[in-house]
Amino acid sequence: MFGLRLSLWLQPGTQVCPVSWHSVHKLASLQKATVLPPKKAQSLLYPFSALEAYLDRSVDRTQFQLFHPSLEDMVEAEKLFNSSPSHKIDYYISAERMDHVPALKPPEVCFIGRSNVGKSSLIKGLFSLTPQIEVRVSKTPGHTKKMNFFRVGKAFTIVDMPGYGHRAPKDFVDMVEPYLLTRKNLVRTFLLVDGSVGFQKADMIALEMCEEIRRPYVLVVTKIDKCGYGTLLTNLLDLQEVVKTRTTSCFPQPLLVSSLHFEGIYLLRCFIAHVTGSIRLTDTAQS
Ligand SMILES: Nc1nc2c(ncn2[C@@H]2O[C@H](COP(=O)(O)OP(=O)(O)OP(=O)(O)O)[C@@H](O)[C@H]2O)c(=O)[nH]1
Ligand SMILES: [Mg+2]
């Protein structure tokens, strides 16, 4: 598969990132990731592949690989995350209440989850090819207090939400729930769960809310770098059980990410590009 990479990068029309490379994270682009040793590159692009070897043979792997885009698809998706004069990526506005939320036409995706689960860090990772965009991250839970809107040209908008749980239940009820209920152009909600600590009570409350709202959502397992494969697999299988038994609107495949090491960032870019209708996938990847 990685043999494809040279020809893909040489294709006419492939955008060149306008940002000076020294300020861009060393793994921000597929070009950098795919020159790594194949096993490492594979686990960055398809994080589940690194876990598979540790999974009992009896476990059905299908659910973990439903969305499995080609490298070519990921290259297409990555172009959308490069800012240019004709495709400007920027922070647009913050809103404290629903009546402050701007009316925007492009399809929208939002990131919700417990405080400190890594929502802002993940958005920062997605935008790492455009590092001048400021996405604030903090060790202190409850850092993001408003709904922050980031425009990706005319293609789509990404919304960073305040967290729920520790110190922030009010923000969640006042902002997140009304937004999820009423936002017309919202095409996908990403519900983040910390992979190093597993599914918590507060996550169940959010999941039940997503189920009640009945809009399509996807679970994203964050901080996969923070624990060993054993813990991660246990937490992942628990999560799969929840998905199987408690959900109807949830995409059956949880997406695994590390914003620190960039695992899963390219796949998530591709997923967002796909669900917002910004790219057409080449083969069997679905959502
Ligand atoms: N090891 C590791 N740490 C992470 C990762 N993602 C985020 N963190 C850390 O987790 C902490 C919280 O990250 P944020 O992105 O601010 O979390 P948030 O969900 O936006 O939090 P609120 O805005 O409070 O809701 C920070 O210290 C991050 O550096 C990851 O993938 N791996
Ligand atoms: Mg935040």
Image (cartoon, rainbow, N blue to C red):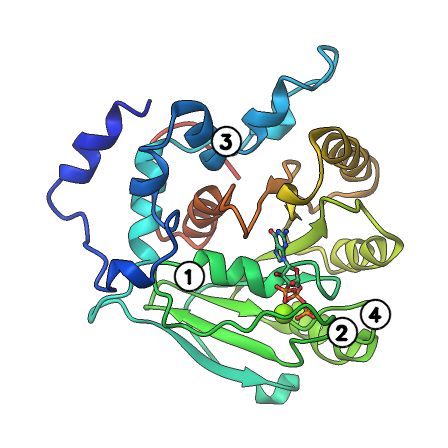
- Residue at the extreme right: 201
Please give left or right for residue 213 compared with residue 104 in the image. right
Q: Which mark is residue 43?
A: 3
- Callout 2 amino acid: Phe
CA gap, disc 1 and disc 2: 24 Å
Q: Is residue 281 visible?
A: no
Q: Which residue, given by chain and number where applicable, does mark 1 sit on?
A: 127
CA gap, disc 4 and disc 3: 32 Å
Crowding around mark 3 (Cα neighbors within 10 Å: few <14, some 14 to 19, many 20+) is: some
SS of the residue under disc 2: helix
Sooner in the amino-acid sequence: mark 3 or mark 2: 3
- Callout 3 amino acid: Ser
Crowding around mark 2 (Cα neighbors within 10 Å: few <14, some 14 to 19, many 20+) is: many
Which quarter of the figure is the N terminus placed in? top left
Q: Which residue, given by chain and number where applicable, does mark 2 sit on?
A: 172
Q: Which residue, given by chain and number where applicable, does mark 4 sit on?
A: 166
Q: Is 259 in front, or is 169? A: 259
